[in-house]
Image (cartoon, grey):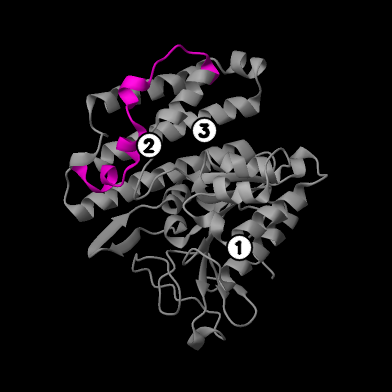
Amino acid sequence: MEHRHCITGSHELIGLGEHAHGDSALADARLELFTRLVEGGVRSIAFESDRVAALIADDYVQGRAGTLDSAAAEGITHGFGAFDVNRRLLAWLREHNEGRAPRDRVAFHGMDAPLEFTAASPRAYLEHVRDYLGRDLDLTEPCGDDERWSRTEAVVDPAASPGDTPAAHRLRVVADDLLAALDAEAPRLIAATSRTDWDRARIHATTALGLLRYHRQAAQPLEESERWSRLASVRDALMARNLLDIRATEAERGPTAVFAHNIHLQRTESRMEMAGMNLAWSGAGAIVAVLLGPKYVFVAGTLAAPEDRHDTRADTRDDRSVAGGGSNVDFGGADAILRAGDGEPTLTPARPQPE
């Protein structure tokens, strides 16, 4: 699959979207495109998965620890590790990296957090940072039982959320102080441990802060459409920050490809209908697009509908809707469209190219 007419050497963050999660012809085409991009210099992938959990997957693909089963089950969250195409991705990365120098290996990152319709307790993440810093800090009382944070009601019912309690406010201060200490003491900490250990502690700290922000938003008694839109906004802002941090880490080694749903990667405002509500927010792609400018490219993925499988032109109506699949859809300001169906997949510019 030729890609250089759509993805060039100037692109440092390459969003490879999909219209739906799961095994499909599109998922296979995206994996094939990714392997071509690695041949061209891409040295990392950011996957729509919890960033801390993804450290397990990275350990596997780097050959440090774990098995394919554990990497898929524990290193890819939101249930996506069960899909065959994602297991094949991990296996391919492991094989590709074997015998290569560290600078030439492909790293696996997560871009998400342990949240969506539920959200984890911040306790384990804060304890990791506390232990790394060697602090004597008892988090038992402010954190309380993990289940009060992680139960579904804590997100769907503002009255059941612990996110706006005095204990939660205290934990946000603690998390911020721990993150500040990581930065302030970086020279000593990295010398005593390693840059990898410091990076991982920082990922835990930012995840804890992200969880506390999400729980705080979940506690707000707003009209339901506005409430869920704001939760989506908090989540995607965290994704965007993770992507920018990943690029800072990977800048000297090569570009980063991103595997996520189109709705998180599109340039225009994200919109979604859910349980009779109309949600709208700025997705991670919209955020990084304005911050990175031409360094970001968004390839929307779609299954070709029967009537347009022989028509490679994209419908580029900018009605600011969800980047989806099939014909007559808006692709969220995409730069290119990856279509897959019964025949060979196609990658085409989303807009007419100058002669």
Precedes in sequence: disc 3 or disc 2:
3
Cα distance between the residues tagged 1 and 3: 28 Å
Residue interval drawn in magenta: 132-158
Q: Secondary structure at mark 3?
A: helix
Precedes in sequence: disc 1 or disc 3:
1
Indicate whether 282 appears above or below 32: above
Q: Quadrant of the C terminus?
A: bottom right
Task: Give the amino acid type for the residue marked by disc 3 in the picture.
Answer: Ile
Cα distance between the residues tagged 3 and 2: 12 Å
Labels 1 and 3 touching (C-beta < 8 A)? no
The answer to which quarter of the image holds residue 81 is: bottom right
Q: Position of residue 82 (x, y in %)?
A: 55, 58
Magenta span includes 155: yes
Looking at the picture, tell me which residue is in the foreground, 135 or 103: 135
Q: Quadrant of the N terminus?
A: bottom right
Residue 73 horizontal side relative to residue 91, left or right: left
Looking at the picture, tell me which residue is in the foreground, 169 or 316: 169
Using the rendered image of the protein, determine whether residue 55 is visible from the camera's viewpoint: yes
Magenta span includes 94: no
Q: What residue would you read off at disc 2?
A: 211
Precedes in sequence: disc 2 or disc 1:
1
**Residue drawn at the location 44% of the way across and 26% of the way down:** 126
Q: What residue would you read off at disc 1?
A: 84
Indicate whether 283 appears above or below 247: below
Task: Give the amino acid type for the residue marked by disc 2 in the picture.
Answer: Leu
Task: Give the amino acid type for the residue marked by disc 1 in the picture.
Answer: Asp
Q: Position of residue 329 (x, y in %)?
A: 40, 74
Residue 244 horizontal side relative to residue 149, left or right: right
The answer to which quarter of the image holds residue 155 is: top left
Q: Secondary structure at mark 1?
A: helix
State the mark number for residue 203: 3
